[in-house]
Every structure is written in structure tokens, then in C-alpha cells.
Image: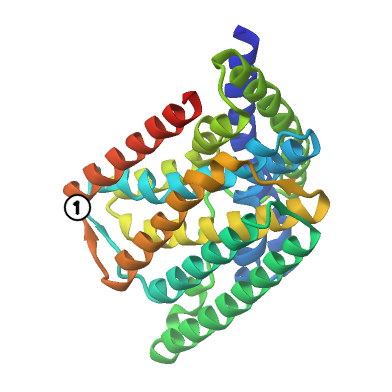
């Protein structure tokens, strides 16, 4: 039993570490090849930071553990809204007035509704995956258009800021290309290994606790794969830059639904567990609606919001386990 817990926690840690190495190595190599920073940010960084979720869902689906495969994504989206926004708000006020946040939050809400409708088909199949990936392309295209427009407007006012505007916000990118290649290789090796350890540990822990694999996917695995986003927003709050939290959550949730589930179900169909249809998918939808309201009202989340959101996540976890034991 001790091995199961070690495999689960070690696998999640390896996923986070390997995903970070993959992003840093890939960004360094892409910059050396002259790929524009905009393209790097919207593709390599976005997909790289979602790599742990992708490898978890793919491995779980291939192993027939559909509860972990879909629970990981649904649970991560819930954790992103309630925890990744809630915890930083306990540390410092989190303004939610980013440019374009309302439009992107609305897109995320629509995507969440579409994903829910697809789930009620019973099985997410190849055609559902194609539909999700098509929506992802629309999102990326719109992001490219909006980013170019924003940069053009900024540069029209001040040409001197052109170089600064083009900088990519990725810390500790290695300048040495040999080191970057090593980072990339280690990331590609570590991600599938971490996924294997996590799925093995998660299924064993679920069996020992007497709960379904969906519960473990929705709670332990989902929270584990959301740790990078949580750590990023907490550090941003400590450094008084908590305004980036909303954009991070919206982008992460969109990629979880469209990229992670889209890629996974084009490889292998995933039957949707009934438990997720009864409760969790509706919590995810409610969180998406709440996020849209926060963006539309351009609210500033203070300590009261932080307490409410964090408490709501604790209550959600309690209900997930309670329902499974009924």
C-alpha cells in the first residue's frame, strides 16, 4: 500500500518537473530557430504546461481507466476556478480586469456547455475529439488576432517598447542549446513515466479506499495536475502581480477541455462515468458561469471571495466522496 501512495505522489511530482523541463527546453530551441514569440507562447508553452494532464488522460484512457481520464480534466477545471483563484485572493486582492478576459471567459463558458452536451452522448469518440480540436483552432486563431492587435496598438504609441513587448514570459530558459536539448529529452522521457506511476498509484489507492477511479481522478489526480497553476498564481499574489490569475485560469480550462480531451478521444473513445454526469459536470459548468460573471463584472477578488471559493472547493471534495459511498 505504501508503494501505491509513493507511486501516486512521485508520479505527480515527476509530471510537474518533466513538464517544466519540456517547456523550457522547447522554448529555448524554438527561439534559436527564429520562431516568433507569439507562436511559442500560444503553442509550445500552452501545450507544454498542459502536458501532465494530457499524458495522464491518454494513459488512463489506454488502460481503460475512463474515470481518471475524464475526471482529471473536469476536476482540474473545478480546482482552477475555486482554488487557483481562491487561494491567491486570501493573500492579496486579485483584480479581474484583464483586456479580453470577458470575451475569453464567454468562449470558455460556451466550450464548457458544448463539452457537457458531448458527455451526455455517453461516450466521447473520435468525432467529438475532432469537434473539440476544431474549437481549439478557433481559440488559437482568435488569440493570435487579439494579441497582434494589442501589440500593434501598443507599438503605435511607443516604438521604443517593441523589444520589450516581444519578450516571452518564461523563467530560466537555458541559453545553451545542448542543455535545452537535454531538458527536452528528459521532459519527453519523464512525462510518460510520471503518467504510468500516477495511474498505477491512483487505481491502487482507489481500490484500497473503496472508491471509484472517477473519484480519485476528480480529486487527488486533478488537484495534483493543477498544482503548477496554483503555485504560479500564489507566487504572483505574493509578488503583487495577482492580476494574471484570471487569464491563466481561463486559458488552462480551455486547453483542458479542447486540447487534452480533444487529443485523447481522437486516439481512443472514453465512456463517461455516470457519477460525473450526475454531479461533477454540473459543478464544472457552474464554475465556468461564475468565472464569466467575475470577468464580465471586472470584480476584484478580496479575502471574502478567497474564503468563499476555497470553502466551496472543500465542500465539493466532501460531496464527491460522500456520493461515492452512498
Towards the viewer: 253 or 120? 120
Residue 27 in sight from this viewpoint: no
Residue 184 point in image, percent of width and height: 74, 45
- In the rendered view, does 78 fall on the left or right side of 256? left
Residue 276 occupies quadrant? top right
Residue positioned 17% across, 48% down in the render = 304
- In the rendered view, does 77 fall on the left or right side of 50? left
Residue 272 point in image, percent of width and height: 66, 46
Residue positioned 68% across, 65% down in the render = 132
Compared to 32, does 110 lie above or below? below
Q: Residue furthest bottom?
A: 156
Q: Residue furthest top?
A: 2
Residue 149 point in image, percent of width and height: 50, 86
Towards the viewer: 264 or 167? 264
Residue 247 point in image, percent of width and height: 43, 62
Quarter in which the N terminus is drawn: top right
- How many numbered marks have been drawn onto this rendered protein structure? 1
Residue positioned 51% across, 75% down in the render = 163
- In the rendered view, does 226 fall on the left or right side of 290? right
The residue indicated by pointer 1 is: 302
Label 1 crowding class (10 Å Cα cut-off): few <14, some 14-19, many 20+?
some
Residue 29 in sight from this viewpoint: yes
Towards the viewer: 227 or 189? 227
Provide the secondary structure element on which disc 1 rests.
Answer: loop
Residue positioned 77% across, 56% down in the render = 125
Is the image coloured rainbow, by chain, by secondary structure, or in one colour?
A: rainbow
Amino acid at each position: 500500500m505504501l508503494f501505491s501512495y509513493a507511486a501516486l505522489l512521485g508520479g505527480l511530482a515527476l509530471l510537474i518537473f518533466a513538464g517544466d523541463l519540456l517547456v523550457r527546453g522547447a522554448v529555448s530551441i524554438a527561439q534559436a530557430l527564429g520562431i516568433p514569440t507569439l507562436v511559442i507562447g500560444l503553442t509550445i508553452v500552452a501545450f507544454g504546461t498542459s502536458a501532465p494532464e494530457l499524458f495522464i488522460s491518454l494513459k488512463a484512457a489506454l488502460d481503460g481507466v475512463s474515470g481518471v481520464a475524464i475526471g482529471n480534466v473536469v476536476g482540474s477545471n473545478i480546482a482552477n476556478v475555486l482554488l487557483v483563484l481562491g487561494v491567491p485572493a486570501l493573500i492579496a486582492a486579485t483584480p479581474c480586469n484583464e483586456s479580453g478576459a470577458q470575451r475569453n471567459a464567454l468562449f470558455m463558458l460556451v466550450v464548457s456547455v458544448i463539452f457537457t452536451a458531448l458527455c451526455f452522448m455517453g461516450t466521447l469518440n473520435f468525432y467529438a475529439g475532432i469537434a473539440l480540436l476544431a474549437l481549439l483552432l478557433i481559440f488559437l486563431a482568435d488569440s493570435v488576432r487579439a494579441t497582434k492587435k494589442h501589440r500593434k496598438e501598443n507599438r503605435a504609441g511607443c516604438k521604443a517598447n517593441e523589444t520589450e513587448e516581444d519578450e516571452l514570459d518564461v523563467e530560466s530558459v537555458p541559453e545553451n542549446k545542448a542543455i535545452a536539448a537535454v531538458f527536452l529529452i528528459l521532459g519527453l522521457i519523464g512525462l510518460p513515466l510520471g503518467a504510468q506511476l500516477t495511474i498505477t498509484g491512483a487505481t491502487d489507492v482507489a481500490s484500497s479506499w473503496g472508491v471509484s477511479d472517477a473519484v480519485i481522478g476528480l480529486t487527488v489526480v486533478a488537484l495534483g495536475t493543477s498544482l503548477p497553476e496554483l503555485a504560479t498564481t500564489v507566487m504572483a499574489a505574493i509578488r503583487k502581480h495577482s492580476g494574471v490569475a484570471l487569464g491563466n485560469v481561463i486559458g488552462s480550462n480551455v486547453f483542458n477541455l479542447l486540447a487534452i480531451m480533444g487529443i485523447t478521444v481522437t486516439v481512443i473513445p472514453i465512456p463517461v462515468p455516470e457519477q460525473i454526469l450526475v454531479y461533477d459536470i454540473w459543478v464544472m459548468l457552474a464554475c465556468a458561469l461564475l468565472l464569466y460573471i467575475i470577468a464580465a463584472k471586472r470584480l476584484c477578488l478580496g479575502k471574502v471571495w478567497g474564503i468563499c471559493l476555497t470553502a466551496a472547493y472543500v465542500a465539493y471534495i466532501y460531496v464527491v466522496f460522500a456520493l461515492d459511498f452512498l
